[in-house]
Image (cartoon, grey):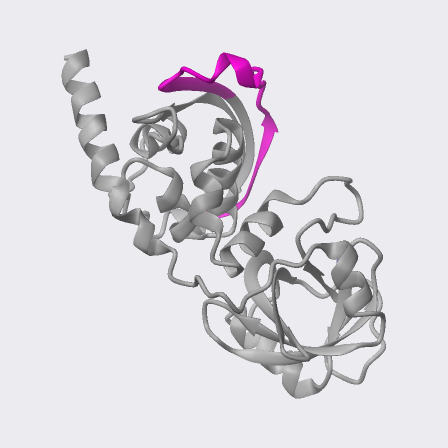
Amino acid sequence: MKTFKVLILLLLLLAGQHHVSADKHMSNDIEFIPWDQVNLLLPKYSKFTVRDVLTGMEFNVQRRAGSRHADVQPLTKNDTKILKEIYQGQWSWRQRAILVLYKGHQIAASMHGMPHGAGALQNNFPGHFCIHFYGSTTHRRNSMDISHKLMIFKAAGKIYEHLQTASPYEVISAFIAGMKEDDEEIIDMVTIQNLTWGKSLSTVETIMIANMPQLPDEDLVSQSQLSVPIELDWYRAGVGRKNSHGEIHLFRFLPSEGWKIDAQRFVEDFFEDEMVE
Ligand SMILES: [Zn+2]
């Protein structure tokens, strides 16, 4: 029975190989410029265009503040309107892959869509929002925010190759971030099965890793399967706040290939008796 299960997993892994084509945003013109250089290229009060990668919609902003990432405001009421449309009428902390267009540059970046703090422009936007570039950090932390990082890789068309070489813990972080951002493309890249998540994914209002003990790299080199204990804090519509303990199971076909998560098992263990078809 066990051999049979492994065989099925191998087949699923092989079937997942065609994922390479998922990297459709690849373009030589997109630049992956680190924050310390962007900081000089786009000084405070500079104005630039933001293009949402998924929808192709564009709007203009002005950088007003921010030392570790850009705190920006939509330039006009119409720019605010477009930003809100991108977020389907609802301000949200969800991160999205964007390109910053400025003087011929197309720079990979990530934004969220929640007005906060102070604003100064007559733009109907109550505050500012944040744009992160590679190497940017949040106001509170010293490391890159995982969701912003993934969205920057996505905007640059490099997310597939990034996840192929990522550690199992980063793959899990990407999986959880994919759930948080409601991004099935990222989830599909790090899972063995392409589940049809339907509505269950959008019921996950927020999810974060509360605890995930990590083995040192040298213990992972020759592994082809791994069970990682994890504690999740999450909030689901209709269910409420949950704190779940369990394990995430990962596999890889060859040591040179990316880790993939057994999503079916995750759903069985963490979504309990609910349905994901
Ligand atoms: Zn900010």
Residue 237 visible in the displayed image: no
Residue that appears at 64% across and 87% down = 78
80 over 11 or under it: above or below: below
Position of residue 37 measured from the top left corner of the image (x, y, whole percent):
76, 59
Whether the magenta-drawn stretch holds residue 168 is answered as no
87 over 162 or under it: above or below: below
Residue that appears at 74% across and 56% down = 35
Whether the magenta-drawn stretch holds residue 205 is answered as yes
Residue 227 visible in the displayed image: yes
Question: 207 left or right of 46?
Answer: left
- Front-most of residues 53 and 163: 163
| Residue range corresponding to the magenta coloring | 203-229
Q: Residue furthest front?
A: 28
The image quadrant that residue 238 belongs to is: top left
Residue that appears at 28% across and 40% down = 275
Tally of marks = 0
> Looking at the rendering, in which quadrant would you find the C terminus?
top left
Position of residue 30 measured from the top left corner of the image (x, y, whole percent):
55, 66
> Looking at the rendering, in which quadrant would you find the N terminus?
top left
Residue that appears at 42% across and 47% down = 160
Question: 208 left or right of 201?
Answer: right
The image quadrant that residue 51 belongs to is: bottom right
- Front-most of residues 232 and 165: 165
Position of residue 167 measured from the top left corner of the image (x, y, whole percent):
51, 29
Question: 24 left or right of 7?
Answer: right
